[in-house]
Image (cartoon, coloured by chain):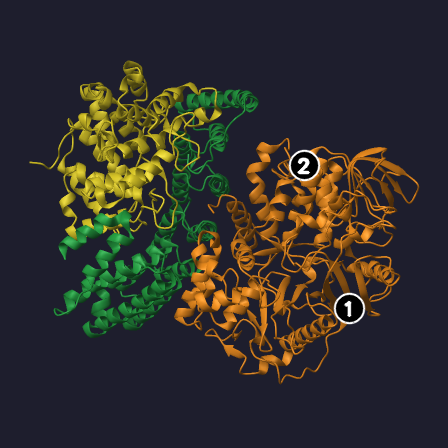
Chain colours: A yellow, B orange, C green
Amino acid sequence: MQLLKEKHIAYVKSLDSHTDDYEYWLSEHLRLNGVYWGLTVLCILGSPETFDKDDVIAFVMSCWDDKYGGFAPFPRHDSHLLSTLSGLQILATLGGLDNVKKDQLKLSQCLKFISSNQLEDGSFQGDRFGEVDARFSYNALSCLSILGELTPEVVDPAVNFVLRCYNFDGGFGLSPGAESHASMAFTCLGALKITGKLHLLSPEQIDMIGWWLCERQLPEGGLNGRPSKLPDVCYSWWVLSSLAIIGKLEWIDYEKLTQFILSCQDEKRGGISDRPNNEADVFHTVFGVAGLSLLGYKDLVPVDPTYCMPYSITATFQKYGLY
Amino acid sequence: MLSPERRPSVAERRPSLYMYQQPNSITVPHLAGIEDPLPETTPEKVDVLIVGTGIVESMLAAALAWQGSSVLHIDSNDYYGDTSATMTVDQVKRWVERIHQGLVPCYSDAKLYVSNSIHPNGKYISKDFGIDLSPKILFSKSDLLSILVKSRVYQYLEFQSLSTFHTYENDSFEKLTNTKQEIFTDQNLPLMTKRNIMKFIKFVLEWEAHPEIWEPYADRTLMELLVEKFKLEKPQVFELMFSIGLCYNIDAKIPGSLQRIRRYLSSYDVYGPFPVMYSKYGGAGEISQGFCRSAAVAGATYKLNERLLSFDPNTKVATFQDGSKVSVEEKVVISPTQASEYSKNVPAQKYEVHRLTCVVEKDCTEWFAEGESAAVIVFPPQSLKSGNKQVVQAFILGSNSECCPRGTSIWYLSSTEQGPRAEMDLDAALEAMEMSILRESDQDIAADDDLVQMAADGHAAVINSVKLGKSFKEYISREKVQFLFKLYYTQYTATPAFDVVNPTFFDTGAQISGKLIPGASDNGCLYTAMPSSEISYDEVVSAAKVLYEKIVGSDDDFFDIDFEDEDEVANNEQSKLSYENAIEDDDDDVGGADRDIEMQDETSEFVGEMEL
Amino acid sequence: MHGVKRRQWTKDQLKQKKEKDRMKIDVYSSLVNSTLDRRDKNDHSLTALEDTTKLLDMNPEFNTMWNYRRDIIAKLKTELPLQFWDKELKFIMVQLKKFPKVYWIWNHRIWVLNNYPGSPASVWERELDIVSALLEVDARNFHGWHYRRMVVGKLENITGKSMDAGELAYASKKINNNISNFSAWHQRVQLIDRMFANGEIEDRKEFMEKEINYLTNAMFTDAEDQSVWFYINWFVNYPLVQSILGKEQYIRFLESMTTNILMINDDDIEFSGSDNSWCLKILLVIEQRQKELSPGFESHSVQYLEKLVVMDPLRKNRYLHLLSKQ
């Protein structure tokens, strides 16, 4: 089976035309993330111009939260670290970062929003209501890296917390003591990579991480997120990017995973689903396509495993810790 | 006219009122023809005439009615159910008399004892009891269950769980060790035995994918596979073959027997920690009525007390005993027990099933799991003093099944042994059960130090699962089990034990040869199969489907029903079913009352969300 | 969308759905707008609270609405009767039952419990029962396990008493229930480690011996299951095992593990004609320890790795990497 590039481009393009579906309205809280996923699919497929650049930037800026700083997922919603990262990623991809970086008020509000959500133990809450999760550590550090504003005051405690999420089995949990989950391997290793702190993991730990990650591959080729779970296309990203970050990508079978991702395509309407014959969505589409890019699938734009964005864009981000 | 003395019908128990006001409540459709008085006239023309309201005929009637065929469904009895009926004691008495008079084909040698305690002025009355003619259990993962859900017939029914299967060996009952948990935590099983059982369980769950394991044994027996390939020892082999697989003798063949073992194991934890359910108020009889009711909702016409006299395949006219006639466009389907006089096409019923049904004045809770009211006991070959060659299966129902009053229970024993030996086996099994229940329920037994241990907290705790873990060879009981009811009978069937229904059973002589038998009153008719010895409902769906295909041409749209409120209901189907089944008896837990109620519906509703 | 089967809609179905949706959208979006208007006017009334209830009932993933709801509750806190809090918990439970995997709802529940007047132990104890019921249904729900750890932590804070022993019994129960429940094995590791660290285990040696018995049983019950093997990998490398058993007994433990694992592996070879890859993977781990402890140890690791390269091709490169280090 081949990658149905044109279908996927058409699929992503069609996403914003579903305004007469009730579900579309119910998913406003994910809209900015959705735009980032869609845009990244298009970038990796080499068709970023499918979206109107100015329209998208205008939409992103309309999600700005004047009260607390940062981006909300949708106009009038509240900002959150999850959507703030998506907003910055989109702006970076479309060359619109100056909308924040060159706007002193917005920049300071944004930095304040991020740093005010860091807690005493170095962890981050997603917004002012106290939910702590290693995902938010990644969001915060990635945002600061995109803005070129990483500082030791934020980084050191943050890294300390992320290291505490490491588990005995070689995986990472969403907080210290929580069960290992493939998505947390990505957020934690990504956070360490962004901050140049991967060396804080011992070679034995790196080997153990590689072991846990490569055991995610199931005989049918797909990867699961935890032991005894079903394979899912999004884990091909979480696991692959993690393996790429620690330089052990080849510890899984490329060919079988490629076939698994391709088998999850909707051949009629485009898009990729979690497992074969399920309903496709843009979330699994981006992680499927990004996974294929990491696997070296032909004619795809190379993806940076740390940021899940094309290398051409992340090359401009701050390289912290590389003195 | 309905039977004068009878148990409440499904329709009476769950009337079609919109009284359940809670959200997502079940709406029981209105009951044309069953709640309302039965029509006195028959239609002039129908697509299909079905004679006999046993479970197969009833499911067929519902399937055809929903498919759009017009159906006339009659029964010569004054009650629903035919070979699957659930009867009161008085109804059984009349039925036995009719067998003696030779009026009930396919049954013989009926012997009945009824105690004086069952009497209009006695301690019990006739309709306190619901006696099944073909007692059955329902596997949680089975064709019938999915049809019940799809057709929504389950809404008329209530199910209870059954998780205890005992194997009788060396004069004692052993409880099954068959879940991963039991195997893992059992301190007595040797490590390699644990491994071997687990290996087999894993294999059998996907045996088709591993022909390299079973194909070398394809012409041999399950026993040989278990002993040679999986190195299992006799207790485990017997459990797997006879209790889990419900096989009938040591010659059980592969792969049929693997399928049967898998049926049990894959049914575990579908709706809860039990593999099997049974329907409350009566088994196959209750489900037959459910399908009849569904058929009636879809427009089928019902008539009881109606007997088919003859069918003329040329004019396509069926004539009834009351003189009325109906023109049948498609097919006439007849239960062998209701074949018309001068019928010559009834398939030969070559196999005997021997049954012994008792009601005893003991609640028998010793045999049930906590919160349950039923159990299965299996007597493997050579385990009884009669030296039985075939298994004796016993299905025990307690009073929570609402089939018998408090303080009593019903014991259904059956054997596939042919000829007079069968009754000896049944008697031997009955005696073993009697001894066991007496010993177990003996008050004095608690004084026996061997059987009772003090737990750490000072409470007396019974070791082992059952006191009967110990042989009761030397045990002499002080009392006797009081029998309220005892019924022996032999039933004949065309389906050999262990087989599913073979489509050719339905091809009568006339159809095979293409010639009509002169003078026969049933030329061109189809006959349904008599129930076999099978204790599960497995044969029912396949039998109904085969007939459906013969009538409609294909079984593609068998119960392909498009209900209007699909959207709302489809999502809740699973959870509702589980709620009704699994939580039913769960009302006496510890803790504050308030919290319990909350916890209960929490559990029940989460069930639907579960990732299986 | 996870686990939603792809569905082909017919034209008619689509038309019907669109019609239904149009009505739903109208109701929903006008309520969204009016409620956000209220928020912008700093309306912290009960009516506003009621509006958020309606909206969250329609869409429990609308986190901005949860935020507004919390702001209202925080403002009204002193006026709200005690029943309000229980009602709020019930409301959340209804949403959780529908969406047991939505982060926002779990998050709101914790917030409400933290703000519950007095935050009494009884409220948190009830939470423990609720989370047990949830894990009864989905024993691998990691939200559930995470939540359980938070609730237990809170209770320990309130009562000043460790609940580790009880929680270990709970984890064991979950493992006994399903030996493949890695969430419970994970919890077992957390608890054992903490109990040793806090001196909560009286007879340390007996505890270790029991644990060895437990994992041996598990290994024989299911030798295919990676949960058990990951646990064994942890246990073999757990520094306290050696320090409590003493070097001699620890070496004997490693030897008996090797014997048992080889027995399982031989049994698999006899049964299916090939080695059990998990047996080999864990033998490698055990040999590593043995090599460190006994300098003259005769290793079979190269042989195991060469077998694994062939048997488990998906992970072939990991074995080649390990071979290169031998």
Instruction: Give the letter of the chain under mark 1.
Output: B
Q: How many marks?
A: 2
In the rendered structure, the answer to whether residue B175 lies left or right of residue A129 reads right
State the residue in front, B190 or C249: B190
State the residue in front, A251 or B466: A251
**Residue C237 in sight from this viewpoint:** no
In the rendered structure, the answer to whether residue A228 lies left or right of residue B311 reads left
**x and y percent of residue C270 in the render?**
36, 65
Q: Quadrant of the C terminus of chain C?
A: bottom left
Instruction: Give the letter of the chain under mark 2.
Output: B
Disc number for residue B547: none
Residue at (62, 85) in percent of width and height: B474
**Disc 1 vs disc 2: which is toward the camera?**
2
Q: Which residue is mark 1?
A: B486
Is B273 drawn above or below residue A216 in the view shown? below
Query: Based on the displayed image, in which of its 4 quarters is residue B549 positioned?
Result: top right
State the residue in front, B224 or C168: B224
Residue found at the very far right of the displayed protein:
B323
**Residue C50 in sight from this viewpoint:** yes
Residue at (47, 42) in percent of width and height: C89
